């Protein structure tokens, strides 16, 4: 598995696979051909179908500055990967390079014909079962395991990550008005915080944790700075659960960092063994993974056992199996923003269940990750970030 630095990335929304990944691919290509006369970028699959709503063209053009760049949305041609881009550099009318790049989720890219660099793999284990065995043998918690392989510097990195997550909540809570993109979705984070309904302690908690998830989701949808956890679209779940828990249980900064590291291991396992891309496996891969990460981190904050952490993460992912990705108008707004809030509440529920039911658990975390991947491969393309099925098709 790779470093948690590859999972948690500070970036600009609304989509890690549709803006951060393409921008990174464009940066690499432009760096290799800074003096070409013109460039062409052809987008395929989900990038072609939802790229306009997600701002893929803006993200790519932003890299090339005032150069001559043509962007083509090829919605018809088949493609090897659901997020495929072909980059062309021209001198005169001659193509000096054509490069195919895949945006594989969470802002990560893969150039066709190249494999991931083996030196970037810093963890020797690739399954929860292996990690659990190692931790039990060496009396380690998951966060200690992460530090063992990442080095102590990862703690400072996590502090920076938390600062950015918290900032996205703070900034989102201050905003009002309508989100960009034409759907006229009203920002509701601030509305949730200030709502004055009669409520029980439970609904109060749900409202507050939801307001934090909405705040990040709305920042993401408006091109604000967020942290991929594991993606831009699902970036509100983990900060909402962690901030709410810190405020309500007096957890320390150390508890928070340990939770982020624990959640990171869980997210990394999904990224390694399945996918965190909505275009590849539907929303179960994004929101499901975010919920699983948040549940594992929260269980760590409560100092729960490794088995309880595993069960929390498993339950959180299991009950997102089959969740489709059908963003209305190709924007990361409906159903995405509310979905972050629902998943945040679900992560808290998963940890509550783990308190009582871990001993009777039947499904391992590794099994549910495999099931999620296989389910994702079976989900029709119309429900994998193409905006041609489900809510996106029916919304008028
Ligand atoms: S529906 Fe889920 S996977 Fe699809 S864009 Fe929204 S958050 Fe991402």
Image (cartoon, rainbow, N blue to C red):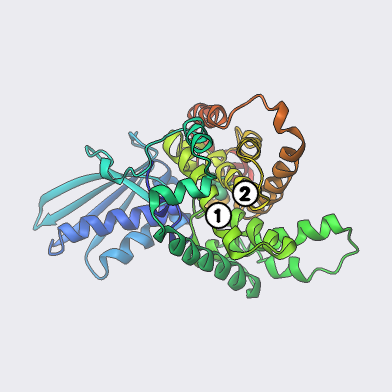
Which of 106/91 is in front?
Answer: 106
SS class, disc 2: helix
Which of 230/26 is in front?
Answer: 230
Looking at the picture, how far across and down is residue 389, in whole percent? 56, 38
Q: Which residue sits at x=47%, y=35%?
A: 134
Q: Which residue sits at x=16%, y=54%?
A: 89
Q: Which residue sits at x=67%, y=54%?
A: 341
Left or right: residue 93 compared with residue 195? left
Q: Quadrant of residue 19?
A: bottom left
Looking at the picture, how far across and down is residue 319, in whole percent? 66, 35
| Quadrant placement of the N terminus | top left
**Which residue is disc 2 drawn over?**
300
**Label 1 or label 2, whichever comes before in sequence order:** 1
Is 349 rendered above or below residue 200?
above
Q: Residue at the front extreme?
A: 138
- Can the viewer see residue 17? no
Q: Residue at the top extreme?
A: 362
Q: Is mark 1 within 8 Å of ligand 1?
A: no
The label on residue 268 is none
**Alpha-carbon span between mark 1 and mark 2:** 7 Å
Label 2 CA crowd tier, 10 Å (few <14, some 14–19, many 20+)? many
Looking at the picture, how far across and down is residue 43, in whole percent? 33, 47
Is 315 rendered above or below residue 182?
above
Q: Quadrant of residue 82?
A: top left
SS class, disc 1: helix
Label 1 CA crowd tier, 10 Å (few <14, some 14–19, many 20+)? many
**Which residue is disc 1 drawn over?**
258
Kindly check if marks 1 and 2 are in contact, taking CB atoms under 8 A apart as contact: yes
Looking at the picture, how far across and down is residue 349, in whole percent? 73, 44
Which of 253/268 is in front?
Answer: 253
């Amino acid at each position: 598995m790779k470093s948690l630095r590859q999972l948690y990335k500070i970036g600009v929304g609304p989509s890690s696979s549709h803006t951060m990944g393409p921008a990174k691919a464009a940066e690499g290509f432009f760096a290799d051909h800074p003096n070409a006369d013109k460039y062409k970028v052809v987008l395929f699959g989900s990038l072609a179908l939802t790229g306009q709503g997600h701002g893929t063209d803006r993200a790519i053009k932003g890299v090339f500055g005032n150069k001559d760049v043509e962007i083509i949305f090829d919605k018809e041609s088949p493609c090897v990967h659901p997020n495929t881009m072909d980059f062309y550099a021209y001198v005169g009318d001659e193509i000096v390079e054509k490069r195919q790049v895949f945006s594989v989720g969470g802002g990560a890219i893969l150039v066709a014909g190249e494999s991931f660099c083996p030196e970037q793999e810093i963890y020797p284990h690739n399954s929860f079962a292996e990690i659990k065995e190692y931790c039990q043998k060496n009396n380690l918690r998951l966060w200690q395991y992460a530090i063992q392989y990442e080095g102590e510097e990862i703690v400072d990195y996590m502090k920076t990550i938390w600062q950015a997550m918290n900032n996205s909540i703070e900034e989102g809570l201050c905003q009002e008005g309508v989100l960009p993109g034409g759907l006229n979705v009203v920002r509701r984070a601030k509305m949730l915080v200030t709502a004055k309904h009669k409520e029980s302690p439970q609904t109060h908690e749900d409202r507050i944790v939801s307001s934090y998830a909405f705040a990040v989701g709305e920042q993401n949808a408006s091109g604000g700075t967020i942290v991929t956890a594991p993606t831009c679209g699902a970036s509100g779940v983990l900060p909402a659960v962690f901030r709410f828990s810190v405020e309500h249980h007096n957890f320390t900064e150390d508890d928070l960092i340990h939770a982020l590291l624990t959640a990171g291991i869980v997210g990394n396992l999904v990224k390694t063994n399945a996918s965190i891309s909505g275009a590849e496996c539907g929303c179960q891969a994004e929101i499901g993974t975010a919920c699983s990460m948040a549940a594992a981190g929260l269980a760590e904050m409560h100092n729960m056992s490794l088995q309880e952490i595993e069960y929390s993460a498993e339950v959180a992912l299991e009950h997102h199996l089959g969740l489709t990705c059908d963003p209305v108008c190709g924007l990361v707004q409906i159903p995405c923003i509310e979905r972050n809030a629902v998943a945040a509440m679900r992560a808290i529920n998963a940890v509550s269940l783990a308190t009582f039911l871990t001993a009777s658990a039947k499904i391992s975390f590794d099994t549910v990750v495999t099931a999620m991947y296989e389910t994702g491969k079976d989900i029709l393309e119309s429900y994998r970030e193409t905006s041609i099925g489900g809510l996106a098709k029916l919304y008028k």
